[in-house]
Image (cartoon, rainbow, N blue to C red):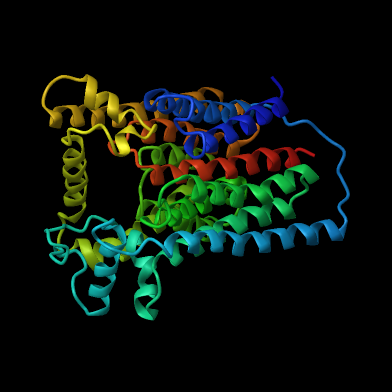
Amino acid sequence: MHFRLYRSLFIVLLFCEILLLTSQRMRYMAHRENALVMIFITIAMGVLAMLAAFRKSEHRIEEQYGGWESRLMKIVALIAVPLCAFHFYREISVIPIAVQISDIVPTIQVMNDRILNGQYAYNIIRDFGYDLSPTYLPLMWLPFLPAAIFHFDERWVAFVIWAIAALLVVRRAQLGKLSTEAKWLLTALPFFYFILIEESTDATYGNTIELMIAGFYMLFALQLDKIREYLAGDPRKKGALLAFFIILCLLSRYSFLLWLPFFFLIVWVENRKLALSTTAWAFLYVMLIYVFPFMIKDPSIYLNGIKHYSEGALLVWLQPEKVGPLYEGLGMANIFRDELGGEMAQRLSALQRWQVLTSLTATGLCTWIWWKKRAQIQHLSLFLLGSLKFYFAFFYGFIQMPYIYLMLTPCFLSIVILLSFYREQEQQV
């Protein structure tokens, strides 16, 4: 199969993915079928990207672009941001920040208020009518400190971070020597995704700050897209920069944790100095952001966070009604809840084990393919991005609480992978 065919199939699945997450979710299928199809689509997208990484992209005649067309694309992007902001405001204006609705933003508010008042952020929160042990890693709540200082809605911070990432995707597409169709597609996709999610899901932006996490992972994916520049650059400077984007994800929502050793293995084989520099900088960032300010006072806060998530998930699993996130057409959690025998805690533990096992297996398979075929890889960035997408199929497919908002990250990642598809063709010209 040719590189262009892989890319075309990827685009088809990209639109299927967003539609089955939003407007077409469970319209034609029951929740289990929708979840299985979503997992299959995610796996297929990762596989297509990895397979394409072994193919030379076709040479093409370079197109000439007029200044008017470039300016028009920039205008469209600049109009799209306030349009998305309008949709965002429309949602959050009718969804107050209230612990009775969701404790995500209220928890962030309490933790930042404590920092401003010189208190320890990870003390148990007793303000909600129940005891809540703060579980969030530092970059899940510290980015919202400006909102606490200047007294504006924290959810705008998440929007701004996502918008910056989206504009950087658009900018890289517009600066590249891509076809006109590719530039227009990549200019429109981030904003199309954003508005479709707002229109078709319930309070995804209003009750969460997951847009920020999606933005962080998009920024990291943009670094994978230019991994060859990192490997060829000054290890000290590039290592500090690469570690910074890794830490954005690692100290917020560390979904890629079980995939990360595979990435470091590739960097180690390709450029040991860069691997050592990146590791050293990442260690330094973790110590400065997490260990010294917080963890050194209470080393149990990380394990307490994991325990809290499991306890919260078990409470939902114990509810007799078959409603809520387990039955919204995403993830395999409902199968483990309804079909396995034993106590409910045992069923949840089984799902947790499957999540770790399948995620590690996916990473191990990608590692084996890379090790055996690394000399034949034509597009390393595409292989890395495809392997991350492939890994996410299992990590999110077997997650214990498959909330819709958690799927924003793998969904927006698809846009950066498509960008890499087009840029790899550009680099072969």
Image quadrant where residue 120 sits? bottom left
Query: In the image, is residue 155 above or below residue 173?
Result: below
Q: How many marks?
A: 0
Q: Residue 190, can we see it?
A: yes
Which residue is painted at 50% across and 24% down in the image?
369
Query: In the image, is residue 146 above or below residue 279?
Result: below
The residue lying toward the viewer, choosing from 219 and 160, is: 160
Residue 161: percent from left, percent from top: 49, 62
Quadrant including the N terminus: top right
**Left or right of 196 on screen, residue 26:** left
Image quadrant where residue 101 sits? bottom left
**Left or right of 407 on screen, residue 172:** right
The residue lying toward the viewer, choosing from 181 and 89, is: 89
Residue 45: percent from left, percent from top: 55, 30
Which residue is painted at 14% across and 28% down in the image?
346
Which residue is painted at 72% across and 29% down in the image?
4
Q: Residue 384, can we see it?
A: no
Query: In the image, is residue 368 above or below residue 102?
Result: above
The residue lying toward the viewer, choosing from 122 and 344, is: 344
Residue 317: percent from left, percent from top: 20, 35
Quadrant including the C terminus: top right
Residue 89: percent from left, percent from top: 49, 64
The residue lying toward the viewer, choosing from 61 and 44, is: 44
**Left or right of 335 on screen, residue 162:** right
